[in-house]
Image (cartoon, grey):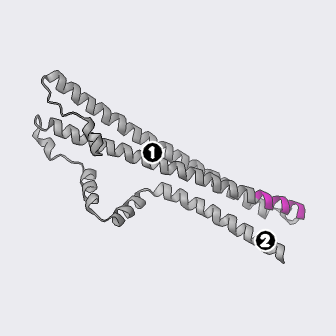
Amino acid sequence: MANEEERFVRLEPSTIEASAALRDLFLADLERLEESIWRNEEIGEKRFNFFVTFATAVGGGLVVLWTSDRSTTDTFRAALTKATSVALVTLLVFGLVSYRRMMHRDSVTEEYKREIRMIRRKYRDVFQAECLELEDYKLEREIKSEIAEHESNLKHLATVLIWANVSLTLALLGGLALGALLCFCGAKRHKQVK
């Protein structure tokens, strides 16, 4: 982060136009990054909703097939067993890929937030001489972030895990798909041994 701040040269605006241009640049960057965060979050939410819908549809379809009258025939049961295995493996793979994308999304969002905090600090540093109120101006989120830096890593990790609930829910759903696959395969092997 220190390297990012070193990229900026402390500017002493010599004219009102230069000061206004610099202020506009800071504000435009803030607006662009905030919009990027919202887009990134929206894409993640859509990906999550798609996975939940897909998993629900697959699970519902399997329940309907297994409880149908046709599931009593040996040929249908054998085909359904293979279809169930394929469906559960597909859900597991799709869940793992979705989870990886969500983790990437979370890291990109955190990077955007770091850049926003850096721009806000630079804005405050450059313009506090013009507006003394900027010196003490901090959002509640910034105050919490400063406090979190002083907390233990374990407590900070717990906070991150609580707020990363969409990614964790996706991981949980993937784990459930794995558990269902293992139970299904175990039950299938148990029936073959008898």
Q: Is residue 49 magenta?
A: no
Above or below residue 15? Residue 168 is: below
Q: Residues within 10 Å of mark 2 (few under 14, many from 20)?
A: few
- Say whether residue 191 is left or right of residue 22: right
Q: Position of residue 66 (x, y in %)?
A: 78, 63
Residue 118 quadrant: top left
Look at 54% across and 53% down and name the residue there: 99
From the image, which quarter does the C terminus lie in? bottom right
Q: Position of residue 102 (x, y in %)?
A: 50, 50
Q: Main secondary structure of the magenta part?
A: helix
* Amino acid on which the number 2 mark rests in the picture: Arg
Residue 52 seen anywhere in this rendered image of the structure: no
Residue 68 seen anywhere in this rendered image of the structure: yes
* Amino acid on which the number 1 mark rests in the picture: Glu
Q: Nearer the viewer, mark 1 or mark 2?
A: 2
Q: Residues within 10 Å of mark 1 (few under 14, many from 20)?
A: some
In this view, the residue in front, 22 or 49, is 22
Q: Position of residue 41 (x, y in %)?
A: 45, 45
What SS does tag 1 mark? helix
In this view, the residue in front, 174 or 8, is 8
Look at 22% across and 42% down and name the residue there: 121
Range of the magenta residues?
Answer: 74-83
What SS does tag 2 mark? helix
What number is the disc on residue 189? 2
Residue 71 quadrant: bottom right
Q: CA distance from mark 1 to mark 2?
A: 42 Å
- Say whether residue 133 is left or right of residue 111: left
Q: Which residue is mark 1?
A: 41
Look at 12% across and 24% down and name the residue there: 14
| Mark positioned earlier in the residue sequence (1 or 2) | 1
